[in-house]
Image (tube, grey):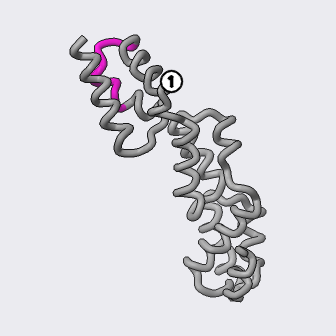
């Protein structure tokens, strides 16, 4: 029984620091668990008491990362953290939010619109690498580079 308390205490330490998905918490605790049943009991208890929540983790993750990354990258990373497809779909930013984020990322990185085809391709590759869809990336690069317009669209 002492081992379970130890495992439970470790779990409490992890979730007290930051939000974790169930899969992340499982991975962190697995080396300390005597068997899989013990680990599942602790994970179920934490989920039942809402000390660990995949939904909360997903929302916090999207909130912190969506400013710099597009939906494709967010989706990929959340899947890697063991989050269900339904939670991912519900948490992803809207098309308008994603476009606004892509415009912000492009303007921060490049400071001015592309002057030729090569520069445009470079900017496009950058946005695609960040996980923005090609449609969002194209729309972001076509957006007027007037700073006032960017701030007007946020109101």
Image coords of residue 127 (percent x, y):
63, 66
Left or right of 11 on screen, residue 106: right
Image coords of residue 110 (percent x, y):
58, 81
Left or right of 2 on screen, residue 96: right
The image quarter containing residue 93 is bottom right
Principal secondary structure, stretch drawn in magenta:
helix
Image coords of residue 66 (percent x, y):
59, 58
The image quarter containing residue 7 is top left
Q: Compared to 85, does 108 lie above or below?
A: below
The image quarter containing residue 54 is top right
In the image, 126 versus 96, the foreground residue is 96
Q: Residue at x 74, y 84 (%)?
A: 149
Q: Residue at x 50, y 38 (%)?
A: 81
Please give the range of residues in magenta.
28-36
Left or right of 61 on screen, residue 13: left
Q: Compared to 84, does 119 lie above or below?
A: below
Q: Neighbour class for label 1 at 10 Å: few (<14), some, many (≥20)?
A: few
User: Which quarter of the rendering shows the N terminus?
Assistant: top left
Q: Which residue is mark 1?
A: 48
For mark 1, give the secondary structure: helix
Left or right of 153 on screen, residue 5: left
Image coords of residue 87 (percent x, y):
65, 38
In the image, 131 versus 152, the foreground residue is 152
């Amino acid at each position: 029984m002492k081992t379970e308390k130890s495992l439970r205490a470790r779990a409490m330490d992890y979730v007290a620091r930051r939000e974790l998905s169930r899969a992340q918490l499982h991975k962190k605790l697995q080396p300390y668990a005597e068997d899989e049943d013990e680990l599942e009991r602790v994970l179920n208890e934490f989920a039942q008491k809402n000390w660990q929540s995949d939904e909360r983790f997903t929302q916090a993750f999207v909130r912190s990362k969506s400013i710099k990354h597009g939906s494709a990258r967010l989706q990929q990373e959340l899947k890697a953290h063991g989050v269900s497809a339904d939670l991912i779909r519900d948490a992803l930013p809207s098309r308008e939010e994603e476009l606004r984020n892509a415009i912000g990322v492009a303007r921060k990185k490049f400071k001015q619109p592309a002057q030729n085809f090569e520069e445009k391709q470079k900017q496009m590759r950058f946005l695609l690498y960040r996980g923005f869809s090609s449609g969002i990336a194209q729309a972001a690069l076509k957006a007027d580079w007037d700073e006032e317009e960017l701030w007007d669209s946020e109101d």
